[in-house]
Image: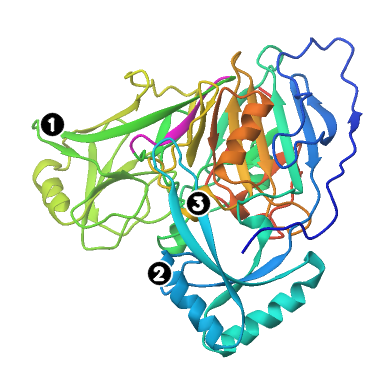
């Protein structure tokens, strides 16, 4: 099915409203670009600029117009909305048997830095303007009544050519004039989820955005756990997914790199065992470290808990399934790891927990000092000024993640060390379409980033400035998330 314009042409007027900065403010070394918006038909965006504090500006950016409409997509036997050509043609035949006219659409998921392009096929039925979604719903019901699994699709979400619109919020933090610092937080505990608004309020943050992905595939009461590295105030609270992109925050500096962690338990008798995870559910035969920030009980899996004081002394051995005492850490062993603890972590002995966070670009370990914070990103987008999308390495090399448009939370750094935070709202037909990975990378380059990563997105995308949520989350309300990046006044 060909893509065609469903409404009038694109026409966006340029507008600029600026809140005047104090007269004594120094010139910014990071500024909003004057070039045309890089997505869609490359028009001049509308933007409203607001000075947040010295060295921080917030931009409300809008571009594009709505010309996409709706179609009905037939799901494949896999449950996906795409498949191989033969499968798609078979589904199209089922649609024809119901007396409707299908279209088999070839879709190219573009090549990225670490994965080749992929060609897939979709089966679509009908095409309706934005105002006629009810007609698409009627067609979907007809096909469902005929035994097909289908969904109504807004074409602006596809990731193919679009005119938008886009609703973007951008915070630019000038390295030369900003006098505060950057931090990370997992809220009141690792296990629980909280809104960015709540986490920002708790720290009196000037700006807050949601951090990395959190684990939706674990027990409900543990779903605040980050999927990837988390360091807060120099404390390792979640292990890295080796090689995944991350942002390292120290004082008022931010840089993007790839990291790995190694954690090892070393008994006073010299025996060692790898610690498989930090503050997460334990799998069979795993050794997992729990800190007091965990906020949940250790697994009740017939394993063993060894409670360590701040110096690594074994305070007590206990059955698993209890909370982490204040000021303590717990090594929990399941299966073979439980046997190791019983043999090498006797009460009164010392068990050192050696922790290393290694920067894979430099090969050097990061010093776990109180001013160090690390947040794992979802996908690398820009490296050394060029689009460099590491979707496969970062676990997101599907058609849905690379090509389709979603709300995005983006972080970039400039050549002089300034920080750029951006949210792109999406999943709001006719209002804002979000961005795919390529568009997200193009947007961050346009804003001046020489390094950039994608953080968690979708319904998690949130930006809070001076205590106010400034974007429009796609869930309609702000979602609880695992962690947040905070811009602090001191």
Is 48 one of the magenta-colored residues? no
Q: Quadrant for the N terminus, please.
A: bottom right
The residue wearing badge 3 is 108
Position of residue 279 measured from the top left corner of the image (x, y, whole percent): 37, 47
Query: Would residue 194 be found to the left or right of residue 424 on screen?
Result: left
The residue wearing badge 2 is 86
Query: Would residue 311 be found to the left or right of residue 186 on screen?
Result: left
> As rendered, which of 332 and 174 lies closer to the eye?
174
Q: Is residue 108 visible?
A: yes
Crowdedness near tag 2: few (<14), some (14–19) or many (≥20) residues, C-alpha within 10 Å? few
> CA separation, marks 1 and 2?
62 Å
Up/down of 419 relative to 75, above or below: above
Between discs 1 and 2, the one toward the N terminus: 2
Up/down of 214 relative to 308, above or below: below
The residue under the point 76% across, 57% down is 5
Q: Is residue 232 visible?
A: no
Label count reads: 3
Q: Secondary structure at mark 1?
A: loop
The residue under the point 68% across, 46% down is 197
Magenta segment main secondary structure: strand
Q: Which residues are magenta?
A: 242-251
Between discs 1 and 3, the one toward the N terminus: 3
The residue wearing badge 1 is 268
> CA separation, marks 1 and 3?
57 Å
């Amino acid at each position: 099915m060909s893509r065609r314009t469903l409404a009038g042409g694109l026409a966006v007027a340029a507008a600029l409203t600026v809140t005047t900065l104090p007269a004594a403010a120094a010139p910014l070394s990071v500024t909003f670009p004057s070039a045309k918006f890089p997505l869609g038909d490359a028009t001049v965006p509308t933007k409203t600029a607001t000075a947040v504090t010295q060295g921080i500006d917030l931009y409300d950016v809008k571009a594009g117009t709505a010309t996409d409409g709706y179609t009905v997509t037939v799901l494949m036997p896999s449950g996906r909305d795409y498949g191989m050509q033969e499968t798609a043609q078979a589904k199209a035949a089922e649609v024809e048997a119901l007396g409707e006219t299908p279209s088999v659409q070839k879709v190219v998921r573009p090549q990225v830095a670490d994965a080749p392009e992929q060609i897939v096929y979709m089966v679509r039925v009908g095409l309706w303007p934005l105002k006629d979604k009810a007609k698409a719903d009627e067609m979907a019901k007809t096909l469902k009544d005929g035994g097909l699994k289908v969904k109504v699709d807004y074409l602006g979400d596809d990731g193919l050519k679009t005119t938008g619109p886009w609703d973007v919020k951008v915070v630019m933090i000038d390295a030369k004039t900003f006098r505060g610092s950057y931090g990370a937080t997992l809220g009141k505990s690792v296990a629980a989820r909280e809104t960015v608004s709540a986490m920002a309020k708790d720290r009196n943050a000037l700006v807050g955005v949601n951090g990395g992905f959190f684990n939706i595939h674990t027990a409900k009461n543990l779903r605040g756990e980050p999927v990837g590295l988390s360091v807060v105030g120099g404390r390792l609270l979640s292990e890295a997914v080796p090689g995944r992109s991350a942002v390292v925050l120290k004082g008022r500096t931010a840089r993007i790199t790839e990291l790995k962690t190694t954690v090892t338990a070393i008994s006073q008798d010299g025996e060692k065992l790898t610690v498989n995870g930090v503050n997460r559910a334990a799998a069979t035969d795993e050794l997992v470290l729990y800190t007091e920030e965990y906020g949940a009980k250790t697994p009740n899996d017939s394993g063993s808990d060894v409670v360590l004081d701040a110096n690594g002394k074994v305070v007590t051995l206990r059955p698993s399934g209890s909370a982490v005492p204040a000021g303590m850490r717990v090594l929990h062993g399941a299966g073979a790891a439980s046997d190791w603890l019983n043999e090498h972590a006797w009460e009164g002995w010392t068990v050192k927990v050696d922790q290393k966070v290694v920067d894979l670009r430099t090969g050097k370990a990061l010093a776990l000092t109180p001013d160090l914070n690390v947040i794992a990103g979802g996908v690398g987008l820009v490296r050394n000024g060029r689009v460099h999308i590491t979707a496969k390495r970062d676990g997101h090399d599907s058609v849905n993640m690379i090509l389709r448009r979603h709300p995005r939370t983006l972080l970039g750094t400039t050549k002089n060390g300034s920080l750029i935070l951006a949210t792109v709202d999406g999943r709001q037909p006719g209002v804002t379409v979000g961005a795919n990975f390529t568009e997200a990378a193009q947007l961050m380059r346009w804003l001046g980033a020489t390094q950039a990563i994608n953080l968690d997105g979708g319904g998690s995308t949130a930006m809070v400035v001076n205590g106010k949520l400034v974007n429009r989350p796609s869930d309609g309300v702000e979602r609880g998330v695992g962690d947040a990046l905070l811009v602090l006044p001191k």
